[in-house]
Each structure stands twice: as structure tokens, then as C-alpha cells.
Amino acid sequence: MHLLNRLLITIKKLFTRFKTARKSSIVWREAWSDFLLRHVSFYQTLSVQDKKTFENRVLLFLHSTRIEGGVDVEVTDEDRLLVAASSVIPVWAFPKWHYFNLQSVYLLPAAFDEDFCCGTANANISGMVGTGPMAGKLALSKPHLHLGFKNARDKHNVGIHEFVHLIDMADGICDGFPERLVEFSYAAPWFEFVQKKIDEINSNQSNIRDYGATNSAEFLSVATEYFFERPAMLKRKHPELCALLEKFYRQNSEEIINDKTFSKNAPCPCGSKKKYKRCCMQAV
């Protein structure tokens, strides 16, 4: 069968499996603020006024973007809040930002393969931004979305990762340079610097996640996860990278204070119920 025909059939099957999103008006609930306060470290650090602004931007995202579930996936308010928070965090310094290149977010029950099927041998994808016939669509593994916010110190957040790809693609190409956020004159030195950092990853001389060495686009997303989850560590171990990301996102790493110092004997912030020294401290 012709490749294009197979692709169109796959897309058609995908859409027939997804439930229709709610179309009712969305009004902020007090319980949602409590949820963000418990689960989103970025939100925790904001002033009272900025928390309200964050909530308004979450509402704007929810009004303009469908969030739907695949077969056997019930989309909850908590799911919607985490998706929306993922969208707001990287563009917090850009109050007029709108994801014009996104119409729908689909949540799947687990990691999936390139055909959006879970449970297969190649089902190792936790997030994917659509291109071509799938443009304007984003697929996320629901459990991986929640895991990204449950452990705010592992330098891994698939929601933020995929929204950075959308930011990168806003200029029409996913090349690892967020042209809509920063002057194009920074592009050449940035790509040269990225290649240097990728070489460090490949030679086991970096604590940046291995997936960041895939290409420049993945490096940007992986480095951004690091920036928002462990800003103090990034500034200490990769000061030049941290400074560049501060310039890109117009956010001061020292003000992203979710990278807190924990007592060795305190409960680990990842929620494992182990002492910090017996858990995530070992990965620092």
C-alpha cells in the first residue's frame, strides 16, 4: 500500500479513537489553585498577584485548546491543569504568547509508538508534536505528564519538553532555536555552542540527559527541562548554557526557586516517602 495512504489510514484510526472534548464554558475553581500549589513548583514560587495571572493564562489556554483522551483515558481537571501549566511555564515572560500552532492535545494511557499505539515493542514515546497531516496536534502519555510534575528535581518534564518544541516550531521549522523568543543574530553562536554541549554528552562529560544529544531541537527541549527543574544545578554545572536560556526565556534562574536545598534526613520531594539522602540526593 502506498505510504501516504497508510499514513492517512493511521491518522483516521487515531481520530476515531479519541473522545470529543468538553465544549462547556470553563470557570476557575478554588480547588484548582490548591492543586497547582501542591503539584506545580513554578506556581508555588509566584507572588499572589502572579499566581492569579498564571491562573488566567491557564484558563485562556483551556478555552483555546481541546484536551482529549484516547480509548480508556478519562481526562480530568487535574490533567488539563498540568497540560496548561506546561504551556505557560516556558513563555511566562511573554504574556501575549499564543500557541497558534496547536489546536488539540491528546492524552494516551501509557507510552506509545509512532502509530500512537500503546503496549507494543516500540512503545517508548512519552510525547510527540505532530507535523504534516498531524500539524497542530500534541500527544502525551498521561502518566508521564503527571510524573514530570510529581518529581520536580529529576530534570525531566515531558509537558514542558513538548511545548518547547511548539515554541521552536513557531517560526515554521523545528531546528532547536526559538526564533520567536530571541533575536536571530544569536542563532549561529547558539548552534555552535549546542554542538559543543552535544559532544560533551556523547563523551560522558555532561550530566545533561543523553536524549539531548539526539539533535539541536531535542537539546533545546532537554536543556529547558533542566533549566526549569534544577536551575541552581544548571547554573553551577553549565553557567554559559544557563545564561543563554535566561536570555531566551527572559527568566532569571535565581528567581526560579523550586531548586531548594533539602535536609538529608527530610522526606524526598519526589514523593517516594524515603529520606532525601536515600533517594534523589544520590542523583544530584
Image (cartoon, grey):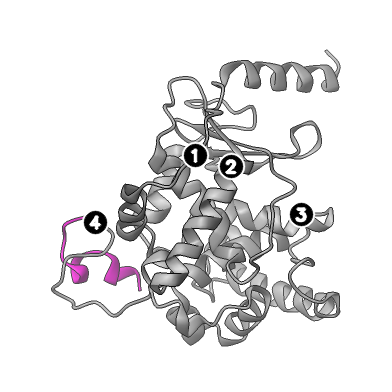
Residue lying at the far top of the rendered structure: 1
Q: Earlier in the sequence, mark 4 or mark 2?
A: 2
Residue lying at the far left of the rendered structure: 265
Query: Mark 1: which amino acid?
Result: Ile
Q: Which residue is mark 2?
A: 63
* 10 relative position to 187: left or right: left
Front: mark 1 or 3: 1
Q: Is residue 112 above or below residue 172?
A: above
Callout 1 secondary element: loop
Q: Which residue is mark 4?
A: 271
Query: Mark 2: which amino acid?
Result: His
Q: Position of residue 198 (x, y in %)?
A: 66, 69
Q: Which residue is mark 1?
A: 26
The answer to if 5 sits in the magenta stretch is no
Query: Mark 3: which amino acid?
Result: Met
Q: Quadrant of residue 186?
A: bottom right
